[in-house]
Amino acid sequence: MGLLGKILLTAVVIAIVLLVVRYRAQARLPVPREPVTVTMSHRSPVPVGWVASAVVIVMLAVVLYWLYSAWRDDHDVLYVRVVDAGTGHATEYRAYRGDIDDREFVTTDGVRVRLAETERLELTTIPPGRN
C-alpha cells in the first residue's frame, strides 16, 4: 500500500469515527413531545464537539509524525558493500534505505544493482575507510 493509500485509509477511518460519534449522540437524545426550553444549566459538562475535534487532531498529528518518520528512515544513506564470495572482490556503493530490496538496490546516483547468487550484501552507516 503506497503513501497515498495509507493517507486515504486514515481519512476514511476518521470519517467513520466521526459519523458513529454523531449518530450515537443523536440516538441518545429523547424525542421531545412538547417544545422544551433549554437553559445553559442543562448543558453537558463535557463539550462533545471539542473532545471529538481534539481526538481527530491528535490522530492526524500521530499519523503525520508516523509518515514523516517512515519517510526520514527511507531516506537514510547507507553504505552498501557487495562482496563476491568466489573471488573476494568487493564493490562499494551508497544507497537510500528505502531503495534496498532483497537482492537488488538503487544507488544514490540512480544505478540499479542486482546481486548474483554468489554475491553477498553488507550494509553499514559508517563510511568506508573509517574504523
Image: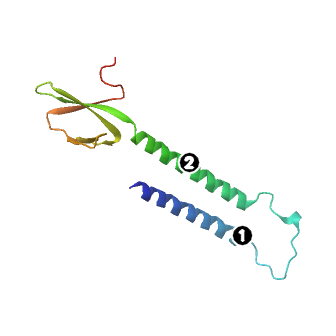
- Label 1 SS: helix
Which residue was labeled with disc 1?
A: 28
Which is nearer the eye, 119 or 93? 93
Q: Quadrant of the C terminus?
A: top left
> 44 left or right of 108?
right
**Callout 2 environment at 10 Å: few (<14), some (14 to 19), or many (20+)?**
few
Tell me the kind of residue under disc 2. Answer: Val
Count all numbered tags in the image, as a single digit: 2
x and y, in percent, of residue 31 in the image: 76, 78
Which residue was labeled with disc 2?
A: 62
Instruction: Kindly identify the residue that appears in the image at 80 percent across and 79 percent down.
Output: 32
x and y, in percent, of residue 105 in the image: 26, 41
Q: Quadrant of the N terminus?
A: bottom left
CA distance separating discs 2 and 1: 31 Å
Instruction: Kindly identify the residue that appears in the image at 88 percent across and 63 percent down.
Output: 41
> Which corner quadrant of the image does residue 92 belong to?
top left
- Label 2 SS: helix
Residue 87 to residue 54: above or below: above
- Indicate which disc residue 87 carries: none
Residue furthest top as drawn: 131
Instruction: Kindly identify the residue that appears in the image at 39 percent across and 55 percent down.
Output: 2
Instruction: Kindly identify the residue that appears in the image at 40 percent across and 40 percent down.
Output: 75
Tell me the kind of residue under disc 1. Answer: Arg
